[in-house]
Amino acid sequence: MKVLIVEDEDSIAEPLARGLEREGFQVVRVATGGEALRAAEPDVVLLDLRLPDMDGFDVCRELRARSRVPVIMVTAKGEELDRVLGLELGADDYIVKPFGFRELVARIRAVTRRASARPDDRGPLLAGALSIDVRARRARLGERELELTLKEFDLLALLASDPGTVFSRQRILEAVWDTHWYGHTKTIDVHVAALRRKLGDPRWIETVRGVGFRLVEPA
Ligand code: CA
């Protein structure tokens, strides 16, 4: 997942970028609003409100005018009114400086999860012969419609949102079960087993030991 950090203060941007990279994010850093608007579209934007060349609000407005990329506004303490305005301009969330790194990562995952669950006109998720229509909540393998439970569908849609990419158990729990509680981790295995059975080939969902799972079309 690509994160665009728009922040002019190196003392904030630098450790943030390194931390996010350690979490497995691809990070692009820019220091001005102009650069942010010229950058290739990421999966999520962390947007500082006070930028040297333009207001974070204007950047947000322009981003929103042309894309649905999730935007998290980064504000300083006491900018309460600003936060409200930011959300009205279409920011998906805000976080107040100084913020905890874990909290930020949780926010990033939450907004990107909401964005990918948002019904839109991107069409079905495709992975080889597998086609998942998130809006209609239908999954087909070739011509065969898959009969999936609610959670099986959510899990398959999550994995199919980025085929070939490993999804950690933690991320799956957060996205599908909305929990951080590790007691649920066996639940994932049960659902993965059911999906493999319904897909008719266990190789569709590959276990990456100690990490998580990824969707791969069997060769
Ligand atoms: Ca700033």
Image (spheres, rainbow, N blue to C red):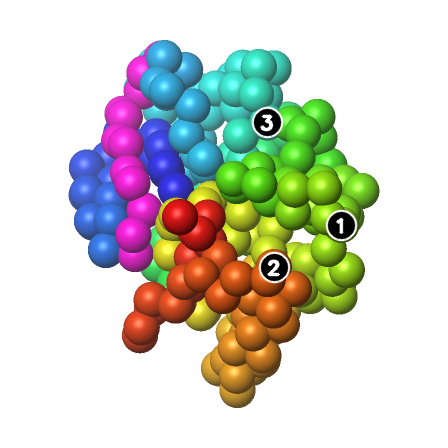
Q: Type of residue at label 1?
A: Glu
Q: Count the marks: how many?
A: 3
Tags 2 and 3 in contact by the CB under 8 Å rule?
A: no
Residue 56 lies, in percent from the top left, at: 46, 25
* Element on which disc 2 rests: helix
Q: Residues within 10 Å of mark 3 (few under 14, many from 20)?
A: some
Q: Which residue is mark 3?
A: 68
Task: Give the CA distance from mark 1 to mark 3.
Answer: 30 Å
Tags 1 and 2 in contact by the CB under 8 Å rule?
A: no
206 sits to left or right of 72: left
Q: Mark 2, mark 3: which one is toward the viewer?
A: 2
Q: Residues within 10 Å of mark 1 (few under 14, many from 20)?
A: few
Q: Which circle marks residue 145 in the picture? A: 1
> The N terminus lies in which quarter of the figure?
top left
Residue 166 lies, in percent from the top left, at: 38, 56
Of residue 113 and residue 13, the one placed in the foreground of this image is 113
Residue 111: in sight, yes or no? no
Quadrant of the rendered image containing residue 115: top right
Of residue 201 and residue 69, the one placed in the foreground of this image is 201
Q: Which circle marks residue 199 in the picture? A: 2
- Mark 3 CB in 8 Å range of ligand 1? no
Residue displayed at 52% across by 35% down: 71
Task: Give the CA distance from mark 2 to mark 3.
Answer: 32 Å
Mark 1 and mark 3 lie on one chain; the one further toward the N terminus is 3
Residue displayed at 36% across by 12% down: 38
